[in-house]
Amino acid sequence: MDIISAVKKRYSTKAFDAAKKLTAEQAENLKTLLQYSPSSTNSQPWHFIVASTDAGKARIAKSTAEGYVFNERKILDASHVVVFCAKTAMDDEWLQKVLDQEDADGRFATPEAKAGNNKGRVFFADMHRKTLKDDDQWMQKQVYLNVGNFLLGVGAMGLDAVPIEGFDAAVLDAEFGLKEKGYASLVIVPVGHHSQEDFNAALPKSRLPLSVTLTEI
């Protein structure tokens, strides 16, 4: 599926067919989408929890109790469920980890190129963690870049998905010990195939006209 067709076809799935599962290749491609998303200065300040077993999905669904119970079936019935988590603080150890990986992947022709790349990334990291003191928000923005990239990629694969913010993050963070690991959950994205009960599948997409949302100069 070409990218324009995918962006026009994809939608937020309201009900999944629990009997339809992703193939092994599709499941691996989900991980590739997560890994290769863009991020500011290639900082990659994220972690993902991917559940495909009933037990794993049930652990994630604990966060939909009471006030968010309307999202429970989406999580339990989907083939795979991804929890997008953001780092809660940008530390020097993480910046070094990214730099070392870039070096190992052959991105630097010279030591000077490596030093220059590191200087640029540290400049932006320090701007957010020391000057603006909003590095947590900055990192959350990078995770949302990944979410958008993921949703479009999943649509291009011919699969269905829905981004969910309606869950108890405190419950989910506690379930997986995220706070202790330096992360916080932001979005849950179930992936699979929609069921016949999904009313949204047959509805036309609705977007504001470009005359309202776009200025061309």
Image (cartoon, helix red, strand yellow):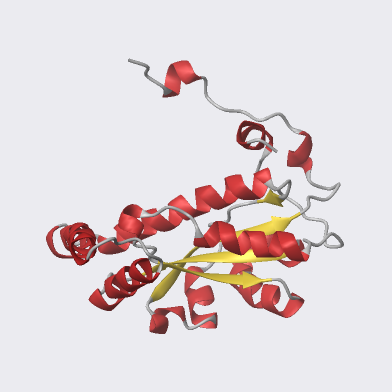
- Residue 169 appears in the picture as rendered: yes
Compared with residue 199, is residue 150 higher up or lower down, i.e. above or below? Answer: below
- Residue 166 appears in the picture as rendered: no
> Whole-percent x and y of residue 190?
66, 59
Q: Residue furthest front?
A: 109
Relative side of 32 to 115, left or right: right
> Whole-percent x and y of residue 55?
72, 80
149 and 97: which one is in front? 97
The residue shown at (37%, 17%) is 216
> Whole-percent x and y of residue 209?
52, 20
Compared with residue 156, is residue 113 higher up or lower down, i.e. above or below? Answer: below
Q: Quadrant of the N terminus?
A: top right
The residue shown at (83%, 50%) is 195
Asked which quadrant contains residue 205, the reply is top right
Q: Residue furthest left?
A: 131
Relative side of 24 to 40, left or right: right
The residue shown at (64%, 78%) is 59
Asked which quadrant contains residue 100, the reply is bottom left
The residue shown at (30%, 69%) is 99
> Whole-percent x and y of residue 144?
45, 53
Relative side of 179 to 93, left or right: right
5 and 74: which one is in front? 5
